[in-house]
Image (spheres, helix red, strand yellow):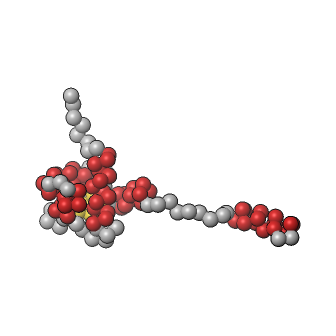
Amino acid sequence: MVRSREPNTESVDDYLKAIFHLSDGGRRRVSSGEVAERLGIATASVTNMIQKLAAETRSFVDYERHNGVTLSRQAEFVINERYRPPIEKGPTRKQIRERMTMEHNTGR
């Protein structure tokens, strides 16, 4: 059985979400220890995964040894697309005009 060298997508998502929440939405760098505590796993495992993520060509994280990790702009975009609640859209201008026309024609 051959193991894949690429991290599991769910696992990567867990790391990205943890970093996002701990960094106050990307406003500060977080340590591997903080991520490890949030995910309930060993700090060494977190550091290893973060280093792997940082080494990728299109990296989702910016990692500096002893300075922690933060999300790249690409990761912030992915997180916003996947995990932010959808914005409920109101009626379009066309729908408003149609409604106003109908109300005007019916005398309402």
Task: Provide residue 96's location: percent of width, then percent of height.
Answer: 72, 66
- Front-most of 10 and 94? 10
Of all residues shown, which one is farthest toward the front? 108
Horizontal relation, residue 26 to residue 64: left or right: right
Regarding residue 39, the answer to whether it shows in the image is yes
Q: Kindly identify the residue that appears in the image at 32 percent across and 58 percent down.
A: 17
Q: Quadrant of residue 46?
A: bottom left
- Front-most of 59 and 26? 26
- Count of marks placed on residues: 0
Q: Kindly identify the residue that appears in the image at 27 percent across and 55 percent down.
A: 15
Horizontal relation, residue 62 to residue 96: left or right: left
Task: Provide residue 65's location: percent of width, then percent of height.
Answer: 15, 62
Q: Kindly identify the residue that appears in the image at 28 percent across and 44 percent down.
A: 8
- Front-most of 39 and 98? 39
Task: Provide residue 84's location: percent of width, then percent of height.
Answer: 44, 60
When the figure is inspected, residue 12 is found, relative to residue 34, above or below; the finding is above
Q: Kindly identify the residue that appears in the image at 23 percent across and 40 percent down.
A: 5
When the figure is inspected, residue 62 is found, relative to residue 49, above or below; the finding is below
